[in-house]
Amino acid sequence: MKKQPIFATFLVIILLVASYHIFSQKAPNSEKTRTIVTTDGELDDVDSFIRLLLYSNEFRIEGLVISSSQWHYKGDGKGTKFTSEMDMTKKMYGERTELRWPGTDWIYNLIDAYGKVYPNLKKHSNSYPTSAHLKSLVHIGNIDFEGEMEKNTDGSDFIKKKLLDDDMTPLYLQVWGGTNTIARALKSIEDEYKNTAKWQEIYAKVCKKAIIYAILDQDATYKKYISANWKDIKIYYNSKQFWCLAYFWKTAVPKELHPFLESKFMGEKVINNHGALTKMYYSYGDGNPAAGEIDDIYSSMEKAKKNQWGSFGQYDFISEGDSPAFLHLVDVGLGNLENPQIGGWGGRLVQSRIAPNRWEDGEAAADYNPFTQKMDLAYAQTRWLETLQNDFAARADWCVKDYKNANHEPKVKLITASKLTVAPNSTVQLSGTATDPDGNKLNYHWWQYDEVDTYSSKISIQNADSKNASFKMPNDIKKGETIHLILEVKDNGTPQLTRYQRVVVTGK
């Protein structure tokens, strides 16, 4: 990694310290992270939702809210004509009375399919919610038009209620479409309390608990309303790292990793012969047109081979562009919930130097891509792709296999403290251990996540492929600079599963 100017390094340290204080208040260990998903029901939302359901034991889903976006809206049923505020959609579709609306049945149909595999999923984790419970969490938000936030809806009222409840653990608001239903919830709170003595208290309460995770701006309501009126709400903004899980993955993902998204893997290990839920997963050439599509360019093999994003085979991955929003919430031992810029399964987002409550990707969050040997704007997400897909395949197995015939992730813990302060030239001992619920052999590997370090050079780790490793603190490390060491433990089961722990070493 290149050396940074002293001022830039100092500024990074200041931002890291500030972000540590912001994220130091965590939910109790006994509490799962709570979240509300807002979705416009696009094809890739369906595929993200299927993966979400297979991970629904890992966090507390508190709401599933159908919203609109620049790509999908229902119309008001009165023939009212609408033109998008977003340039791309305006150019592509012009004036419309509705746009590619998939309806609302899709989410209930997927939950029904989940209900069919739920008895088997319960064999692998008692934390899976019932399909009846998940159905009770579905609400219809603001869906008539892109960016519509003028009226209260069942979905916006539900989000409002959650934002005002007395549970002060973080509430992650996932944005898979537009932010308009969330914006309407916030506007209704503002309308009710703005001119009262309780306003400052209510404003502070909402800003303290709400964290918006947005995949792009899919309407203008965040920029026009939320950022202007609720500037203290934290937002995670992913506009580039989702590329490797989106429609254009063939150009975003190194060719060496393509097999994990291609037909042999997706068809054999996820989609087919794994029960009712993953059978509903949209893939190229599957003969299953997505609801609401104007031009179906996916389901027929003829069009799949000549697609605008490349030539695809039957059962090739199409897109799960929204999955980073919930993958960030899966606790795999990387500690990213404490601070989103240190990296995890949902990528990494760096605190803005201009807006301290905004974390975003881009140049500052680029990771080194060893396949291209270049810094890569998406690689902070792409680096986990093989592990993510193997984990997905294991969850698909859970839908149909009993416990003894499926694979489960290893449990990793540190013996070394997770945070150390060490003087230059000192030797740092690293130690961890793991167990495997299936009795599989475990492989250990320690590595430096140097892109998230504030120290700007590489270190040399001794015995990196063992439980116990060590390295020498650099003689030029400055007080307060950090080095991140990841303990990665992989089993030899099928598919191979991986979990982690992180040690952060700070210069003394």
Image (cartoon, helix red, strand yellow):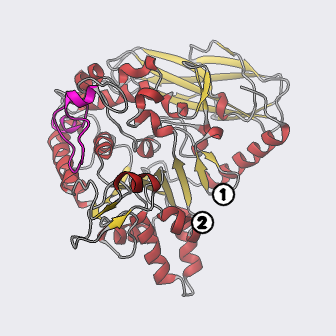
In the image, residue 283 lies in the stretch drawn in magenta: yes
Q: Could you say where residue 26 lies in the image, as x and y percent from the top left?
A: 54, 52
In the image, residue 184 lies in the stretch drawn in magenta: no
- Residue 3 is left or right of residue 483, and the answer is right
- Residue 234 is left or right of residue 456, and the answer is left
- The residue that disc 1 covers is 355
Amino acid type, residue under disc 2 in the picture: Lys
Circles 1, 2 touching at the beta carbon (< 8 Å): yes
User: Which residues, given as a range, are shown in magenta?
Assistant: 276-305
Q: Residues under labels 1 and 2: Cα distance? A: 9 Å
Residue at 42% across / 71% down in the picture?
Answer: 184
**Residue 135 in view in this figure:** yes
- In the image, residue 298 above or below residue 313: below
- Residue 100 is left or right of residue 157, and the answer is left
The tally of labels here is 2
Q: Could you say where residue 461 lies in the image, as x and y percent from the top left?
A: 67, 16
Mark 2 surroundings within 10 Å by alpha-carbon count, few (fewer than 14), some (14 through 19), many (20 or more):
some
- The residue that disc 2 covers is 231
- Residue 277 is left or right of residue 23, and the answer is left
Screen quadrant of the N terminus: top right
Q: Nearer the viewer, residue 272 or 401?
A: 272
